[in-house]
Amino acid sequence: MSKNKEKTSFVMYPNYVDEMWFFSDDEFMEAIDKIAEYAIHGIEPSSKSANVNAWCMMIKPLIAKADKNYDKQIEHNKEIDTQENG
C-alpha cells in the first residue's frame, strides 16, 4: 500500500461500482467496506461472499496503481519543495 503514513482517503471511480450491479445490498456495503479498509489501512479483503472476494481481487490492482502514482506525486512535491526552499 501507499508509503504515505498519513493516508486517510482513496478515490472510488464509477467503473469500480459498475461491476457491482448484481450484488445484494449487504454484499455492496461489505465490498465498499472491505476495499476501503484495504485502500486506507492495507488490510487484505476477505469475505464469505464469492462476489465480494472476486470484486476485491479485481479492484486491488487498481488501488495499488493509484497508490503508486500518489506516492510518486508526494515524492515529486517534496523534491520541488527542497529545490525551492533548500
Image: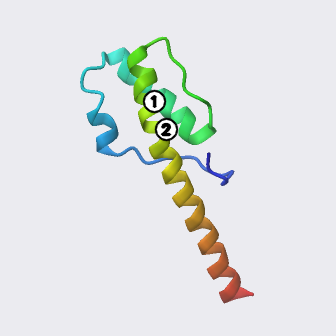
Of helix, strand and loop, which one carries label 1? helix
Q: Is residue 30 visible?
A: no
Q: CA distance from mark 2 to mark 1?
A: 6 Å
Q: Position of residue 26 (x, y in %)?
A: 37, 15
Residue 12 found in image quarter: top left
Q: Classify the position of the C terminus by image quarter.
A: bottom right
- What residue lies at 49% left-to-right and 33% top-to-bottom? 35
**Residue depicted at x 56% and y 33%:** 37
Q: Quadrant of the N terminus?
A: top right
Q: How has the structure been colored for display?
A: rainbow
Question: Which percent across, then down, holds residue 9?
Answer: 52, 47
Q: Is residue 12 above or below residue 30?
A: below
Q: Is residue 4 visible?
A: yes
| Residue 60, numbered circle | 2
Q: Which mark is residue 56?
A: 1
Number of residues whose C-alpha sits closer than 10 Å to that of mark 1, classed few (under 14), some (14–19) or many (20 or more) = many
Q: Nearer the viewer, residue 64 or 21?
A: 64
Alpha-carbon neighbours of circle 2 within 10 Å: few (<14), some, or many (≥20)?
some
Q: Please, what secondary structure does the residue beneath circle 2 have?
A: helix
Q: Amino acid at mark 1?
A: Cys
Choose top left, top right, bottom left or bottom right for residue 46.
Answer: top right
Up/down of 60 relative to 44, above or below: below
Q: What amino acid is found at the position of numbered circle 2 in the picture?
A: Lys
Name the residue at 54% across, 52% down.
Answer: 67
